[in-house]
Amino acid sequence: MVIEMAADGSLPLLRLHVSLAAFLDALVFGPADEVFEGSLDGLDAALASGIAVLAHPARRELLSVLLDSRVGDRRDLAERLARSRTTDCDDAERLEVALHHVHLPKLDEQQYVDYDARSGDVALWEDPGTVEAQLSTK
């Protein structure tokens, strides 16, 4: 947050700098501090990134869905997440936006999925047995 004085020196104006990804994530799923509680200090950076990616319930549910089907498209996955009871949001359109801008890129970066942002196609990248084992050790 940045606090600036108005040009005439009167009441301060507040400007909040938030990334689009963080804004969408908080809008759809709530504050990030409710998702992961704990410290990743002292862990290898790659391991810490992997843990942080799997800490979010929407990404865990998304991977669970992909374990069954192995492939899907962004819209169908958003609709399935909206119907599930694991996310607080039941608006498939908002979920699709969050998947596109936040969750699928993070899962793609950690090589859990292969995500084509143009077509919306998603495929499970990681070995299904490994993903299932990681999801079961919450």
Image: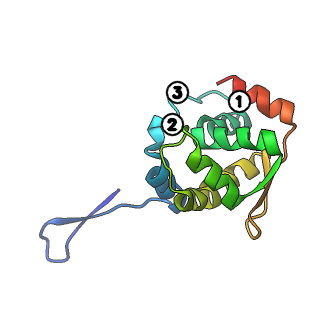
Q: Which of label 2 and label 3 is nearer to you?
A: 2
Q: Nearer the viewer, residue 86 or 131?
A: 86
Q: Which residue is tagged 1? A: 135
Relative to residue 75, is residue 18 drawn left or right? left
Circle 2 — which element?
loop
The residue under the point 84% across, 46% down is: 125
Q: Position of residue 72 (x, y in %)?
A: 77, 54
Relative vertical location of residue 54 with respect to residue 95 in this rendering, above or below: above
Residue at image coords 79%, 40%:
68
Question: Earlier along the polypeptide chain: callout 3 or callout 1?
Answer: 3
- Image position, residue 55 (x, y; %): 60, 35
Residues at marks 2 and 3, CA–CA distance in whole angstroms: 10 Å
Q: Residues within 10 Å of mark 3 (few under 14, many from 20)?
A: few
Residue at image coords 73%, 65%: 117
What is the three-letter code of the residue carrying label 1?
Answer: Leu
> Position of 114 compared to 48: left or right?
right
Q: Amino acid at mark 2?
A: Val
Q: Residue furthest top?
A: 137
Name the residue beneath numbered marker 2: 35
Mark 2 and mark 1 lie on one chain; the one further toward the N terminus is 2
Q: Type of residue at label 3?
A: Gly
- The label on residue 38 is 3
